[in-house]
Amino acid sequence: NRVNKLHRYSSSVSKYGLQFNEKLMGTGTGAQQEQLVDANHDGKLTFDEIVQVLEFGQSKYNDTREDIVEENMDFYREVYSKKVTEPKFAKLTYNVVYDETGLKRVLTKDEYPRANATLLTLVRNKELKAIVHTIRQIENTWNHNFHYPYTFIGDEEFTQEFKDTVRRHCSGEVHFEIIPPEIWNKPSDIDPEKEKAGIQKLIENGVQYAGLESYHNMCRFNSGWFYRLEGLKKFKWYWRFEPNTDYYCSIDYDIFKFMEDNDKTYGFTISLYDDPLTVETLWPVTLDFVKKNPQYVHPNGAFRWLTDSVQNPEYTKLANGYSTCHFWSNFEIANMDFYRGEAYSRWFDALEAAGGFYYERWGDAPVHSVGVALFEDKSKIHWFRDIGYHHSPYKSIPNSDKCTAPEDSGYFAPEDVHRQNCLPNWIKYEMTHKELQQY
Ligand code: GDP
Ligand code: MN
């Protein structure tokens, strides 16, 4: 029965043209994991079977395969070649009303009923120009329609110049929020000796930002603290943006209401592999938590994406069973009530106790991603195929008339980093046929 389900799933997805053959799906014991995971499209796995799947990445390693990177990139380009417009089979809200005569009228900032949401960025005074660069694009492509508020978060007071300048570019209300030092700074229970040894190892292996304490603070803050700030408690939804990122496509519908009305928890544009040395013990600590707290695992989690070992088997090995696949969090749209909920909160406490934000360099992207992929229904995770996005060196460029340079759709990054692309796995392993047809 499970094998049958697997076949039905594979053949529907292969309507895209590419067959998901053995090479792409993995072989040997992989077939077992495949069956378990695909059977799980109906949420039928027992907890023991889920643990088998989650531990799978630890048991199977191949050599690095350039041909798989290439095949996955071909698949990626094929998917991106499809012309996209707005999401289908979804409720979409626009900023217009029609009067009795059928005449269209654009709602003003005061009239439009916004969702409980904020655009949000953690940023420094010295990044003023770079953040304005991005605000202008968010306004031009989207927020001029809706005038959502912005929240600028800093670990130091913003200068008057910073405040005045960003205010001039934002069409919505503007809030500034300073992080209390007891939240931002390294907790006192971090063992200095252990930290020194851990950081030393990362530095020797050339891990970016390993020796920069503020970067560790930033990752920890973005992982489990921003949504607890006084100024953020009143909001449910956030759209995170970063200095010097680009937005390529006009979006006419209200993205926050899309999330709310279509029962989504988390939205992303780019999915990548991570440097496994930064998250060496994230998976073991997580599996330990999961085994002690089976009730939090969602039966329809994105288990296969989390434990893939086909494209970058050496990553999965170094990360002790975690594929390192994550949603790139410098763009993300999500429901903060998910993080505030029991599952994520208790798991985050376990992460804090393990100290990996300082002994290693756990990033907020893998932490959000593992959390949402384990504890939430994967059908609530939305790939925004219509949002064109760039944060160096990666791009997502939709083939859409609403985007600049649709002829570049399918471009991802310079070739030497193609193997960092995990979106093909997300599409193949976790998306249903209907989700693929949504655009
Ligand atoms: P990368 O994208 O991982 O290379 O890291 P970034 O330098 O872009 O940092 C990620 C985000 O955190 C950006 O929005 C930065 O502005 C912000 N950020 C990083 N370090 C700090 C810091 O020490 N203080 C503040 N306030 N923001 C920071
Ligand atoms: Mn950045």
Image: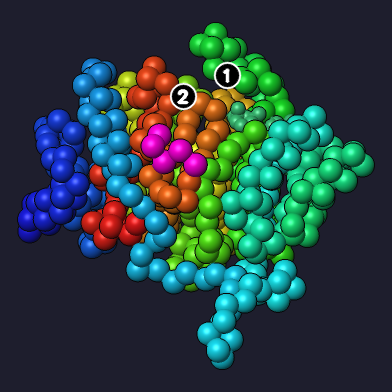
Closer-to-camera residue (322/20): 20
Q: Which residues are magenta?
A: 404-408
Q: Can I make out residue 335 in this image?
A: yes
Q: Which residue is mark 1?
A: 208
The answer to whether residue 53 shows anywhere in this view is: no
Asked if residue 97 lies left or right of residue 163, the reply is: left
Instruction: Report whether 386 appears left or right of 134.
Output: left
Q: Nearer the viewer, residue 299 or 13?
A: 13
Q: Quadrant of residue 206?
A: top right
Give the spatial CA distance, label 2 vs label 1: 9 Å
Q: Is mark 1 within 8 Å of ligand 1?
A: yes
Taking the image in four quarters, ligand 2 sits in the one at top right
**Residue visible at 64% across and 57% down?**
143
SS for dot 2: loop
N-term mark: 2 or 1 = 1
On residue 275, the disc is 2
